[in-house]
């Protein structure tokens, strides 16, 4: 006999209250990163040895600006989801585990905003 | 970890490394390395938006032998994590769990990620005209 209520079963959120949310978004971001990463690597290799002018022109081009913003958002979301799992698996001291996870999440947001700001500045201000 | 004086059961070191287990831990290690590597991406973009001096500093650091060595490691980590990530997505769909398939895909990931790394570097050097 299960003690779980019918409502709990339907919601499927489990004891952590977020169900498969974390697992699912790790996969969705992974799928999105396949084409984004291939595009990014091909573009950066194409820019090998370039001066700042050529790099700025590439960043400011609307197609690459939008794809770069997408890459930044998806990459840092995927990164903090993955790092959270690694920390949860290997850090067993509770305060250190929580502090490390918060650090990774803060770092992901700051790095994502800094790089997105740089892309927008190049695109709009030059 | 405090075990209260109780003995621990044997851990990883008693097992012989296998392709599947080595690739699995390599997926995590490459993921952690890439998380660190994102700092370079941010630095590169911020420097490009700041000015010529800042940008030339990044280019000089990346262009040094140690910078190129790090970039070589990161590019392999990226291609490996990408290829093995696709292998994981097949597992998530319930495909490829047979031992033979797991090994075949595993070696495929190794070969393709090394090949992609080589192609990217040969292509990059040929663009710079230093090949």
Image (tube, rainbow, N blue to C red):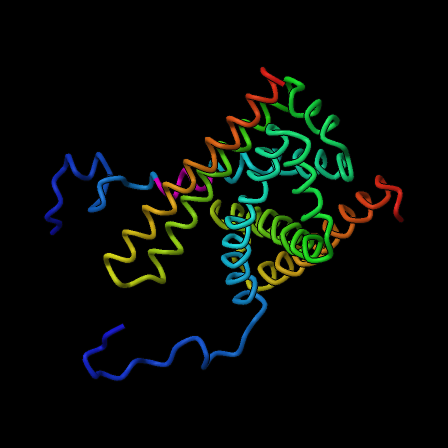
Residue A64: x and y in percent read 64, 24
Residue in the picture at 71% in, 33% down: A43
Residue in the picture at 72% in, 36% down: A42
Locate the C terminus of chain A by quadrant. Answer: top right
In-front residue for pair A101/B82? A101
Q: Name which quarter of the figure residue A18 lies in.
A: top left
Residue B127: x and y in percent read 84, 39
Residue in the picture at 26% in, 63% down: A93
Residue A23 colored in magenta in the image = yes
Is A67 displayed left or right of A80 in the figure?
Answer: right
Residue B77: x and y in percent read 61, 53
In-front residue for pair B34/A78? B34
In the displayed structure, would residue A99 be above or below residue A11?
below
Q: In the rendered structure, which segment of residues is drawn in magenta?
A: A22-27
Is B35 displayed left or right of A17 in the figure?
Answer: right
Residue A46: x and y in percent read 77, 35
In-front residue for pair B67/B33? B67
In the displayed structure, would residue B92 be above or below residue B114?
above
Is B81 displayed left or right of B64 in the figure?
Answer: left
In the displayed structure, would residue A126 be above or below residue B41?
above
Count the marks: 0
Residue in the picture at 63% in, 36% down: B54
Magenta region, main secondary structure: helix
Farthest front residue in view: B53
Residue A60 colored in magenta in the image = no
In-front residue for pair A21/B61? B61
């Amino acid at each position: 006999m299960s003690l779980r209520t019918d409502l709990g079963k339907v919601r499927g959120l489990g004891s952590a209250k977020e169900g498969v949310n974390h697992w699912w978004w790790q996969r969705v971001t992974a799928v999105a990163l396949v084409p984004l990463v291939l595009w990014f690597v091909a573009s950066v290799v194409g820019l090998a040895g370039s001066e700042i002018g050529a790099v700025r022109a590439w960043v400011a081009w609307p197609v690459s600006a939008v794809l770069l913003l997408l890459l930044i958002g998806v990459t840092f979301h995927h990164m903090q989801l993955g790092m959270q799992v690694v920390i949860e698996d290997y850090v067993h001291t509770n305060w250190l585990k929580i502090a490390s996870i918060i650090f990774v999440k803060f770092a992901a947001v700051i790095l994502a905003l800094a790089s997105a700001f740089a892309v927008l500045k190049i695109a709009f201000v030059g | 970890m405090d075990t209260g004086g109780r003995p621990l059961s044997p851990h990883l070191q008693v097992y012989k490394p296998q392709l599947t287990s080595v690739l699995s831990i390599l997926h995590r290690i490459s993921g952690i390395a890439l998380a660190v590597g994102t700092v370079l991406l941010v630095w590169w973009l911020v420097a490009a938006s700041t000015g010529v001096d800042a940008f030339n500093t990044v280019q000089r650091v990346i262009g040094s032998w140690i910078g190129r060595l790090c970039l070589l490691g990161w590019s392999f980590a990226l291609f490996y994590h990408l290829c093995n990530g696709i292998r994981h997505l097949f597992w998530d769909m319930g495909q490829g769990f047979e031992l033979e398939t797991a090994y075949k895909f595993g070696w495929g990931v190794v070969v393709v990620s090394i090949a992609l790394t080589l192609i990217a570097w040969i292509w990059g050097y040929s663009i710079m005209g230093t090949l």
